[in-house]
Amino acid sequence: MNKKSAFPKFSSEPPHIWLTEEQRNHIRAAAQLGRDYTKPNERLELAITQIKNQNPSAFLTEKDLLLRQFFNEPLQPIPYHAFVIRS
């Protein structure tokens, strides 16, 4: 019996998401270990925006977000395709 999967088929190609070492260091520096994580980090948001402009393929698109699959159901209302276990 050939059962059809509820999950979409994914490409065997490696993911197109990558950052250069310089971009990773930029994000690490902006994250500021030990800062107050209850407040927005404007330095980090600026670093992400700059890197997004330099390297847009390093970030998921809306289409990518809709293909995500989780083991546990996400607790927040985020785009995804499926999950295995309801939280």
Image (tube, rainbow, N blue to C red):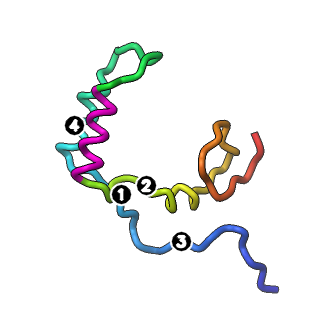
Q: Which residue is mark 4?
A: 25
The Cα atoms of the two marked residues, 2 and 4, are separated by: 20 Å
Of the two numbered discs 3 and 1 on the same chain, state the one appearing first in sequence. Answer: 3
Residue under the point 31% across and 27% down: 31
Dominant secondary-structure state across the stretch colored magenta: helix
Instruction: Specify the segment rendered in magenta.
Output: 43-54
Contact between labelled residues 1 and 2, with CB atoms less than 8 Å apart: yes
Closer to the eye: label 2 or 3? 2
Secondary element at tag 3: loop
| Three-letter amino acid code of the residue under disc 1 | Ile
Three-letter amino acid code at the position of disc 3 = Phe
In whole angstroms, how far apart are the C-alphas of marks 2 and 1? Answer: 8 Å
Q: Nearer the viewer, mark 2 or mark 1?
A: 2
- Residue 36, position in %: x, y? 40, 13
Q: Where's residue 69, x and y in %?
A: 61, 56
Which residue sits at x=30%, y=55%?
56
- Locate the N terminus by quadrant: bottom right
Q: Which residue is mark 1?
A: 17
- Say whether residue 62 is magenta: no
Q: Earlier in the sequence, mark 4 or mark 1?
A: 1
Label 2 vs 1, first from the N-terminus: 1
Q: Are marks 4 and 1 in contact (CB under 8 Å)?
A: no
Give the residue at mark 3: 10
